[in-house]
Image: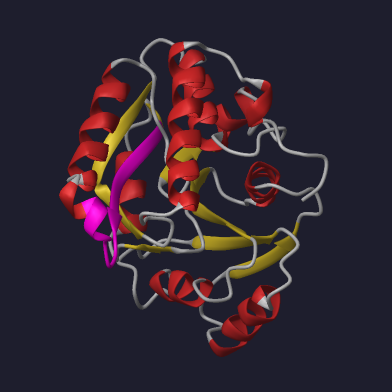
């Protein structure tokens, strides 16, 4: 029915909570699903933690695979290619999906014309910056507007696609070091056939980490790079060289 892909790179502090939220006892979906965790060269014990979690929770249909090529785009591509089901969703290792997440995705895809969706972005333990900026509301408005403009903005920790359209565009651009989610959504929007559509589904809700937020250089660079990538991809229609990853980490 649905495969969930989780890229993992040094996420030992977060991955357990992510996997717990996907346990059958935590999800309302009563149809088959699987979780594909893609290790991308972790050095902090993430792989071993995932294996221990699976031994402790054999009821979770979990597979751990490895991707040697560095970068979240390459890890995501491997996971999507490994996926066994016709619907594929992606979330991140520092994200906790809502109990109705899987069921809400499946319900949206009961409409055969829905080819992909992006869901509601929320944060657990939000930083004061996020509260002051009303960031959750702003992101929701941003997503609605961009779907209406036929320039869907996917956040990597909460979107889903049909395998058919994912293969139609050739999957992720594995050259990218960031913006692989947004870039994929934009290409999907360009290959829609008559009647097909991408939707914003606010009931498909996740809670992501706020760890990057704060008044420090890392957050400023993260924010600046995000806006630069958005402007280049959405409004200039190009992939600038600075967005491409280095040959190795």
Q: Nearer the viewer, residue 101 or 30?
A: 101
Query: In screen coordinates, is 1 left or right of 195?
Result: right
Residue 173 versus residue 30 in the image, above or below? above
Q: Is residue 120 magenta?
A: yes
Q: Nearer the viewer, residue 134 or 193?
A: 134
Q: How is the image coloured?
A: secondary structure
Percent position of residue 168, x then y: 61, 23
Q: Is residue 173 magenta?
A: no
Q: Nearer the viewer, residue 190 or 3?
A: 190
Percent position of residue 247, x then y: 83, 40
Percent position of residue 178, x then y: 58, 38
* Residue 109 appears in the figure: no
Query: In screen coordinates, is 111 left or right of 225?
Result: left
Q: Residue at x 31, y 23 (%)?
A: 146
Q: Residue at x 51, y 63 (%)?
A: 93
Residue 159 versus residue 101 in the image, above or below? above
Q: Residue at x 62, y 63 (%)?
A: 37
Image quarter of residue 137? top left
Q: Residue at x 39, y 71 (%)?
A: 21
Query: In screen coordinates, is 108 left or right of 50?
Result: left
* Residue 9 appears in the figure: yes
Image quarter of residue 145? top left
Q: Which residues are magenta?
A: 116-130
Percent position of residue 150, x then y: 35, 16
Query: In screen coordinates, is 46 left or right of 95?
Result: right
């Amino acid at each position: 029915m649905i495969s969930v892909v989780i890229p993992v790179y040094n996420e030992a502090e977060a991955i357990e909570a992510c996997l717990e939220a996907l346990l059958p006892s935590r999800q309302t979906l009563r149809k088959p699903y699987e979780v594909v965790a893609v290790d991308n060269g972790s050095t902090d014990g993430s792989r071993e933690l995932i294996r221990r979690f699976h031994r402790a929770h054999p009821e979770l249909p979990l597979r751990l695979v490895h991707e040697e090529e560095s970068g979240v785009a390459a890890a995501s591509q491997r996971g999507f290619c490994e996926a066994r089901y016709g619907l594929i969703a992606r979330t991140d290792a520092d994200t906790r999906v809502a109990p109705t997440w899987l069921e809400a995705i499946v319900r949206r895809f009961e409409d055969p014309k829905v080819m992909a969706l992006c869901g509601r972005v929320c944060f657990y333990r939000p930083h004061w910056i996020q509260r002051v900026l009303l960031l959750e509301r702003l992101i929701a408005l941003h997503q609605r507007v961009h779907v209406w403009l036929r320039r869907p903005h996917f956040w990597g920790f909460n979107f889903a696609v049909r395998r058919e359209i994912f293969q139609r565009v050739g999957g992720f651009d594995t050259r990218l070091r960031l913006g692989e989610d947004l870039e994929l959504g934009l290409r999907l929007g360009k290959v829609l056939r008559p009647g097909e559509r991408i939707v914003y589904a606010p009931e498909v809700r996740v809670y992501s980490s706020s760890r990057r937020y704060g008044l420090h250089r890392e957050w400023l660079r993260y924010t600046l790079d995000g806006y630069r990538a958005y402007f280049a991809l959405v409004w200039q229609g190009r992939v600038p060289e600075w967005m491409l990853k280095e040959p190795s980490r």
